[in-house]
Amino acid sequence: MLGEVKGQLDLSFFFSQNSDMIEYLFGIFPDPVTGLSGLGFQAANVEQSRVYGTEAEILLGKTFGSLDAAVSGGYTYVYPVEFNSYTGQSTDLYLKYRRKHTAKLGFMMTRKKFEAGFDMYARSRILRIDDVFLNPATREQILPGFYDYWQTHNTGYFAMDINAGYKLSNSLTLSVAVRNITNTEYMGRPGDIQPHRNLSLRLSGKF
């Protein structure tokens, strides 16, 4: 028996189409004034693009005597591609720095002055990055060693955070949090390795 379970479920589908979309390419480009080459960004016209996707979110809550418990989660699927305006067909060339799958799951419980919870995240690999990071002619000039790292580490990741807090008074709360408790190594973008396991202790107040 589920009993007095309160909850909500959201489900959505989305589709967007862009004409004359601009993407900024990172690479080595000649300076129009001096003619010398250097690192920078250059605007490029991605004539047409389409983004298909779906998103689901759920929230459930239940009270067990003096204990309140809540579970939340979500999943997002995105298919972001360029397409040919003449044929109306997708080219299967992904837009840069996107991921197809993102999922999250969280649990929180509260009992009188104490609360605790955890959050889990899972994301699939990045579909495409700037060619300058992968091209044999330029990759070692930009980020030496990155190419080999990318081949073995762009595989998606799973991470988990936990937290707990105690209300010392109506205005003061002492809490502790451990971020990335799984000590997962992952990147948001090339060269941007995210923090490993981190422990923090916080005293917060409302006055």
Image (cartoon, rainbow, N blue to C red):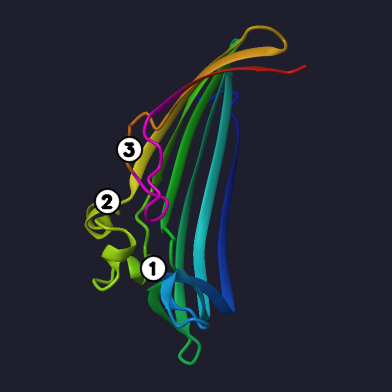
Element under disc 3: loop
With 54 as the anchor, is 194 left or right in this view?
Answer: left
Nearer to me, 54 or 44: 44
Which one is earlier in the sequence, the residue at label 3 or at label 1? 1
Which disc is residue 130 wearing?
Answer: 1
Element under disc 1: loop
Which one is earlier in the sequence, the residue at label 2 or at label 1? 1
Cβ atoms at labels 2 and 1 below 8 Å apart: no
- Which residue is labeled 3 in the image? 184
In which quadrant of the rendered image does the C terminus lie? top right
Is 195 a magenta residue?
Answer: yes
Q: Amino acid at mark 3?
A: Thr
Which one is earlier in the sequence, the residue at label 2 or at label 3? 2
When the figure is inspected, residue 166 is found, relative to residue 160, above or below; the finding is: above
- Which residue is labeled 2 in the image? 153
Nearer to me, 39 or 150: 39
Element under disc 2: helix
Q: Amino acid at mark 1?
A: Asp
Look at the image and give the residue range highlighted in magenta: 186-199
Q: Amino acid at mark 2?
A: His
